[in-house]
Image (cartoon, rainbow, N blue to C red):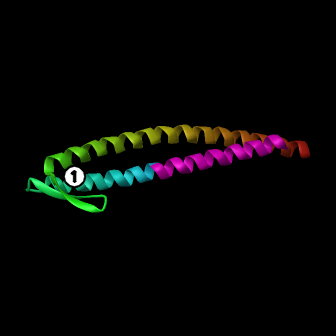
Amino acid sequence: MGELEDAMGQLQAHNQQLQGIAAQKQAYIIQLNEIEKALEYLKNSSGKKIYRAVGSIIIESSLEGVKKELEEQKEDAELRVKTLESHEEKAKKKMKESHDRFEKLAEQRGSAAE
């Protein structure tokens, strides 16, 4: 009986891990979309100077400097999404293994009870 409970606990832990990874991935995807929108806006901008919020103040910045910073943030977010996708695949595999183990143990327990 303890082995079945352990398998269920592992399954629940893998499920929680997978949910956490999915939430992080979604947050980076949203950030990536916002960066892409900002870059598109800057692409259509004709001025050399722009204003941006830094903390609670607004400062004047160069268009090229902000574009460069956003491109770096975009690369970072894309890398994080790819990394999280890799972690997500590994977590799904572990979850499937835990699920299969749980089902096998539950089936063995059910046939032993008969």
Classify 10 Å Cα crowding around label 1: few (below 14), some (14-19), many (20 and above).
Answer: some
Tell me residue 35's x, y (percent).
28, 52
Residue 93 horizontal/vertical position (percent): 58, 38
Residue 94 horizontal side relative to residue 58, left or right:
right
For image coordinates 37% across by 55% down, the residue present is 30
Which of the 4 quarters of the picture holds residue 98?
top right
What residue is disc 1 on?
Answer: 39
Secondary structure that dominates the magenta span: helix
Q: State the residue at coordinates (30%, 56%).
A: 34
Q: Which residue appears at 17% of the width and 46% of the height?
A: 65
Quadrant housing the N terminus: top right
Magenta highlight on residue 30: no
Magenta region, residue range:
1-24
Foreground of the two, 55 or 101: 55
In the rendered picture of this protein, how many numbered marks are placed on residues?
1
Question: Label 1's element?
Answer: helix
1 w.r.t. 42: above or below = above
Which residue shows up at 80% across the image and 40% down it?
3
Estimate the x, y position of residue 27 in percent, counting from the top left: 42, 53
Residue 114 rendering spot, x and y as whole percentages: 91, 46
Residue type, label 1:
Leu
> Position of 109 compared to 79: left or right?
right
